[in-house]
Amino acid sequence: MTKIEITSEGPKDTLRQIQNTIGGQISEKWNEYSLIVNNEHAFGSIKFIPFDWGVNMLSFDIKFSEDLILIIKAGDFNPIRFIYNYQGYFKHRFGINNEEKRIDEFHSLIFTNKTGGYNHIHFPKKEKLEIIDIQIVRKQFLKKRTTNVSLLNQRLYEIFVDTDHENRFAHHGALNLKMADFVKKMKNIKSKGMVKVLKIEALVYEMLSLHIQKHNKFQKGVQLPTSLTKSELKIIRKIGNKIIKNHSFNYSLDQLSLESGLSQAKLQDGFKFLYTRTVTEYIRHVRLEAARDLMSSGDLNVSQVVYSIGFTSRSYFSKIFKEKYGVTPNEYRKNVLHSLITDQSVA
């Protein structure tokens, strides 16, 4: 077992202190710092990206050859950490405790320590890990004009305004498959340079918002639907992703129930929990989003778009499109074409 004591004054120091023990090379491009390791200690990468107002992201995509424990001292740099575990598992405990809490795949952890305390993060050997660690430096974050922590629930509010780090806090979140979709989007970003960093930053704030929403639900006593197991929710998430990839297919509740092996009632409960929509509402939402994207290119007329996304009635499509976006498909397409012509004339 390898132990690394982290006594950093900032998140960037964490990379260097890990490198001192397991080796690898650190590179920087567009303010994204990457530790790449391919040796007897580990294979993969640990990346750090700093954003404005004390928001940082540390991401792990790595497999360690033996158990590794980060022993992180809470000093001047002592953020609130919002961690989401996309793949594998890890364990956490405070230095004053002996019992480790296991954070499984698709689960989250929010924690911070009091000044002088120690956080132990235990990564298992030979386990592929993908972890997103969003770190909020409170004194900087609270200076942001749009930050209104008074809207947080009482427990999170107390933690955010604890800028002198006098309190210890940990929350172990339940299964969260919606967060996984944000991680997947982050992994699939094709842009480079500043555009890539800006897209990552937007997703980081989406994930932070979801962390807070889930904690609010926990405080209110809202738990996983009792009718569904975790494995069944994972099946429903796969169905949701399949609908996104092939939105023109003529889905039916009977067919999805037969294919998944889940009852129609469980499908409805699962879609309401994961997507806040019934199955039919979710399919319609996905198709309308796809239609808007297709019309944004200006290449297809409205009739072509209607049939390409799986609708058979143009009048019905026009009705629900206006209900969702406030304009008719024709009005939307005209605005798109006008913008394209304007952009070309300016160029």
Image: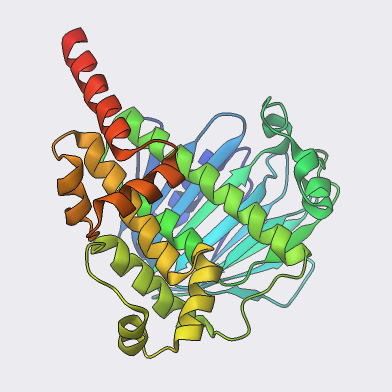
Residue 40: horizontal and vertical position, in percent?
32, 66
Q: Vertical placement of 293 versus 249: above or below?
A: above
Residue 127 image-quadrant placement? bottom left
Outermost front residue? 315
Q: Quadrant of residue 151?
A: top right
State the count of labels.
0
From the viewer's perspective, is 185 left or right of 278?
left
Position of residue 175 relative to residue 156, above or below, is below
In the figure, residue 54 lies in which quadrant? top right
> At which x and y percent is residue 194?
35, 28
User: Would you place residue 212 above or below residue 338 in this image?
Assistant: below
**Between residues 347 and 122, which one lies in front from this camera angle?**
347
Q: Looking at this view, is 254 or 223 the one in front?
A: 254
Residue at 18% over, 55% down: 307
Q: Which colour scheme is used?
A: rainbow
Q: What quarter of the picture does the C terminus occupy?
A: top left
Q: Can residue 85 be seen in this view?
A: no
Specify whether 133 is left or right of 298.
right
246 left or right of 8 in image: left
Q: Which residue is drawn at 31% across and 33% down?
A: 332
Percent across and percent down for residue 94 are 73, 65
Left or right: residue 227 versus residue 142 is left
Q: Name the residue at 73% across, 62% down.
A: 170
Q: In this view, does 201 lie above or below 342?
A: below
Residue 236, given in percent of the width and then of the height, sits at 42, 76
Residue at 29%, 73% (x, y): give it: 251
Instruction: Specify whether residue 220 is in view.
Output: yes
Near-viewer residue (55 or 262): 262
